[in-house]
Amino acid sequence: MADSIKTYTGVEATRSYLAPQNYLDTSHIIATVDAVEITQSDELTDTTFVLEDQSGSIYATFGASITLNSLDIVIKRVTPEAALVVFDNGSTIQARDLNTAFNQATYIAVEAKEQ
């Protein structure tokens, strides 16, 4: 089962669709409807989508003006390839930095395989 990409056929009565659950930053989640990218927002508007925690899972909820019925909906993680963590000589290594670097490499590899 794909970890970085979720694909659906839209149902007009359904506004929320399960998104990839693992990401480093919410800005790494993008959504398209019928191959048109939808803007992510902090607050839901008629023409954007937001990421919401619903019972412990992350869902992409689309605004009311976005037509979804029978269209292809793709919600995917796109992790940047530029290093998110840089280790300098003499710096203190933090567990969160190691985790971020490891997860970034893992996510990029998974995304490349699943595309």
Image: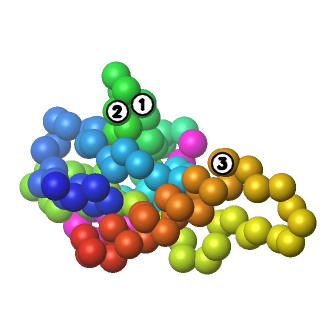
Main SS, magenta residues? strand
Find out whether the residues at labels 2 and 3 contact each other: C-beta distance under 8 Å.
Answer: no
The answer for how far apart the CA atoms under marks 3 and 1 are is 23 Å
Front residue of 84 and 90: 90
Front residue of 9 and 57: 57
Amino acid, disc 3: Arg
Please, which residue is most extreme toward the top here? 55
The residue drawn where x is 22% and y is 58% is 2
Residue 93 is tagged as none
SS class of the residue under badge 1? strand
Q: Is residue 72 left or right of residue 42?
A: left
Amino acid, disc 2: Ser
Q: In this view, does 30 lie to the left or right of 71?
A: right
Query: Which residue, given by chain and number where applicable, does mark 2 sit on?
Result: 57
The residue drawn where x is 17% and y is 36% is 13
* Foreground tag (2 vs 3): 3
The residue drawn where x is 25% and y is 70% is 114
SS class of the residue under badge 2? strand
Q: Which numbered disc, 3 or 1, marks the residue that appears first in the sequence? A: 1
The answer for how far apart the CA atoms under marks 2 and 1 are is 5 Å
Query: Which residue, given by chain and number where applicable, does mark 1 sit on?
Result: 53
Residue 96 is tagged as 3
Please say whether residue 96 is visible from this viewpoint.
Answer: yes
